[in-house]
Image (cartoon, rainbow, N blue to C red):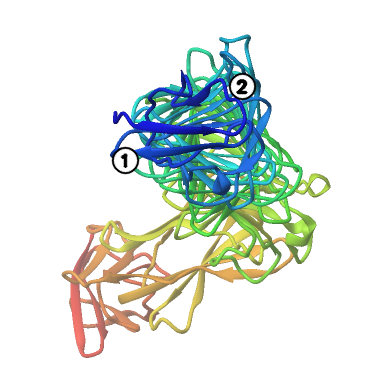
């Protein structure tokens, strides 16, 4: 501190001069960073001699209304102390105002309340290591301080200490830049924009309302878990890396967007989205404890994946914009036509499941609520079981062209084993293509459609009964009619048995109006002929198995197909399957042999013959019997048409065709 010698010319009697918070006689010494004259309560001219040290902090006492830019001897510097008292108002009218400490209200020996007011666009920065705004003084009779940001402006400081007085947030911004842990004054419940922008921790001191944004640019914002203060934000909540947000047990509401690129520690907090316009969650994937959708209008859009312990759907819809919403076991409450999840594109909605029973997924598109219910009938649970759902308001790509609905639900599941479940799902009238009464619930497993049950048209509901036991990846549910969804075969096979027969077997998983099957055969893949008919099961929601035997198959490669015919005469064909019959050693047999002379039969097998000439000779070469036989299949058996009983002796049976001759000796006893 530099001591200056002064010469004072008094035009009017002055008792004391107040400088640097020191009261000195008019003839004495004082310290001042910059000074060449003061006018106090009259005309006082001070002539200064000596050297002035600019490094020392100065104190500015504001006792009458003034603007920051007009402070006498000013403007204050970054380390200076500014005190406003005696009912004065100091207006921040520039964007470069700065000081080291601001006191609003003071006494001892004289004082009064003090107010700082901000103009729009003005900024006051108080950021020295101890930079604080002191609002009110308890000593000297007790005086109040006031901060008025009605017009806007910005206050940047490390901390605010409140004794008495008020804070009017208006449209202003308060930015805290502390490196320590500080708490907002408990007397101030409302801010406009609030910003944390240093490595310290900013705590709430009371239930707090923000009419603007909460920006956490650095450090930690803590809602003070011990007190569980509430936080109501009308603007955006922005958490910017490397900043952290500790939600603790707080109850929070947000009327605009949540952007998180930092760290969101959800605790056991509740976050309600209740804005009347569009709201977005974006940035990085985020984990919430419980979030509530309570919007009277506008969508809540997820632009990132969101995990939550709980979600409560009260009012308004959630749009999954190619992102996922995953909730824990039994975490969904509420939901209905006024609040549901819109699964868009590749997005999905997933819920954890830990017990048997029904689980309703409140889903739909931008205009229609089309929920899906899965009822777990039985399962072996792993402890991390879930069901995932997506709904699209379009025709399934594998759906036929007949009666159907333009909507399908894709279901996946994880964790379960030995799963048995049923489903029901609701469509809207606009989904119906064709005749609604002919619709049947159905699932697509990636290769085949499986039908379940007829539609409940009165309730716009499709459903299954009897239990489904698989959920392959991409399992889709929809609805179609008998043309759009023909009966699909689970299996259709052909197998050679007993070396000369073909067994045909097939199975269905459900049938609708199925009268009968016709087994058809071809040797060239083009011309098919009926082998046999097998009755169908009519209407069935259970698996059915069928089989029949082609007793006389054709030689070489044989082709088979099924023709399925409905009660109304409509029919359709299955895919064609084939089997190859190979010739083994030819056989030509007469039986019984020896014989009593009657009831003699002939069998020839594995001969590539069409017509066979059969003759019977005695040992004298006399012709006893002759007949042309048509070969039917690989094995032909027929009785020799001999009208009389043969006499005892030796005979010869000869068969010939295609330059091939076979002979068998016959003994008559």
Q: Position of residue 38 (x, y in %)?
A: 52, 37
- Sort mark 2 into few (<14), some (14-19) or many (20+) by Cα contacts within 10 Å: some
Closer to us: 532 or 95: 95
- Sort mark 1 into few (<14), some (14-19) or many (20+) by Cα contacts within 10 Å: few
Q: Position of residue 273 (x, y in %)?
A: 63, 38
The residue shown at (43%, 70%) is 560
Residue 302 as seen in the image, left or right of residue 613: right
Residue 11 vs 250, above or below: the answer is: below
**Mark 2 lies on residue:** 207
Residue 101 as seen in the image, left or right of residue 403: left
The residue shown at (63%, 51%) is 120
Please, which residue is most extreme toward the bottom here? Answer: 659
Check disc 1 and report its element: helix, strand or loop.
loop
- Give the CA separation, mark 1 to mark 2: 44 Å
The residue shown at (65%, 71%) is 401
| Residue 168 showing in the rendered view | no
**Residue 54: mark in rendering:** 1
| Quarter of the image where the N terminus is located | top left
Q: Position of residue 541 (x, y in %)?
A: 61, 44
Residue 607 vs 393, above or below: the answer is: below
């Amino acid at each position: 501190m530099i001591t200056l010698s002064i010469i004072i010319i008094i035009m009017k009697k002055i008792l004391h001069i107040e400088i640097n918070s020191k009261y000195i006689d008019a003839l004495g010494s004082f310290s001042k960073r910059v000074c060449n004259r003061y006018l106090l309560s009259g005309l006082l001219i001070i002539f200064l001699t000596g050297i002035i040290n600019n490094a020392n902090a100065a104190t500015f006492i504001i006792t009458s209304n003034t603007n920051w830019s007009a402070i006498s001897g000013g403007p204050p510097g970054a380390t200076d102390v500014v005190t406003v008292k005696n009912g004065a108002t100091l207006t921040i009218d520039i964007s470069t105002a700065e000081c080291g400490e601001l006191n609003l209200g003071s006494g001892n020996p004289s004082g009064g309340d003090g107010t700082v007011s901000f103009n729009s666009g003005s900024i006051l920065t108080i950021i020295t290591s101890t930079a604080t705004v002191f609002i009110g003084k308890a000593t000297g009779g007790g005086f109040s301080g006031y901060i008025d940001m009605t017009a806007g402006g910005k206050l940047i400081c490390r901390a605010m200490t409140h004794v008495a007085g008020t804070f009017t947030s208006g449209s202003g911004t308060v930015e805290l830049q502390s490196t320590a842990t500080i708490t907002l004054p408990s007397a101030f419940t409302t801010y406009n924009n609030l910003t944390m922008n240093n490595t310290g921790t900013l705590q709430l001191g009371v239930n707090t309302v923000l009419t603007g944004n909460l920006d956490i640019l650095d450090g930690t914002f803590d809602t003070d878990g011990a007190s569980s203060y509430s936080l109501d934000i009308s603007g955006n909540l922005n958490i910017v890396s490397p900043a952290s947000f500790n939600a603790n047990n707080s109850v929070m509401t947000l009327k605009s967007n949540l952007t998180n690129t930092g760290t969101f520690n959800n605790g056991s907090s509740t976050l309600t989205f209740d804005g009347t316009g569009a709201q977005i969650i974006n940035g990085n994937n985020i984990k919430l404890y419980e979030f509530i959708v309570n919007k009277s209008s506008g969508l809540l859009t997820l632009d990132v994946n969101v995990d939550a312990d709980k979600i409560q759907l009260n009012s308004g819809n959630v749009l999954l914009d190619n992102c996922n919403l995953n909730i824990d076991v039994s975490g969904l409450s509420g939901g209905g036509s006024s609040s549901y999840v819109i699964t868009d594109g590749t997005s999905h909605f997933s819920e954890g499941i830990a017990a048997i029973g029904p689980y309703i997924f409140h889903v739909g598109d931008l205009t229609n609520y089309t929920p899906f219910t899965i009822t777990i009938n039985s399962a072996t649970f792993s402890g991390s079981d879930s069901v995932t759902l997506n709904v699209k308001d379009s025709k399934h790509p594998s759906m036929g062209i007949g009666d159907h609905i333009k909507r399908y639900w894709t279901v996946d599941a994880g964790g379960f084993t030995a799963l048995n479940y049923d489903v029901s799902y609701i469509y809207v009238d606009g989904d119906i293509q064709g005749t609604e009464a002919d619709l049947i619930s159905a699932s697509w497993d990636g290769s085949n459609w499986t039908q379940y049950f007829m539609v409940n048209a009165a309730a716009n509901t499709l459903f299954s009964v009897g239990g489904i036991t698989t959920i392959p990846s991409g399992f889709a549910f929809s609805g179609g009619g008998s043309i759009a969804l023909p009966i699909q075969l689970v299996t259709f096979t052909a197998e050679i048995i007993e070396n000369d027969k073909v067994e045909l077997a097939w199975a269905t998983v459900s049938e609708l109006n199925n009268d009968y099957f016709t087994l058809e055969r071809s040797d060239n893949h083009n011309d098919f002929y009926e082998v046999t008919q097998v009755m169908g099961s009519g209407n069935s929601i259970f698996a059915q198995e069928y089989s029949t035997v082609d007793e006389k198959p054709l030689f070489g490669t044989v082709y088979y197909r099924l023709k399925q015919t409905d009660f109304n005469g409509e029919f359709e064909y299955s895919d064609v399957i084939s089997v190859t019959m190979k010739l083994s050693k030819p056989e030509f047999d007469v039986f019984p042999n020896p014989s009593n002379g009657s009831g003699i039969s002939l069998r020839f097998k594995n001969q590539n013959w069409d017509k066979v000439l059969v003759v019977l000779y005695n040992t004298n070469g006399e012709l006893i019997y002759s007949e042309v036989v048509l070969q039917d299949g690989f094995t032909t058996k027929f009785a020799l048409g001999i009208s009389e009983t043969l006499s005892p002796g030796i005979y010869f049976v000869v068969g010939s065709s295609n330059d091939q001759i076979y002979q068998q000796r016959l003994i008559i006893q």
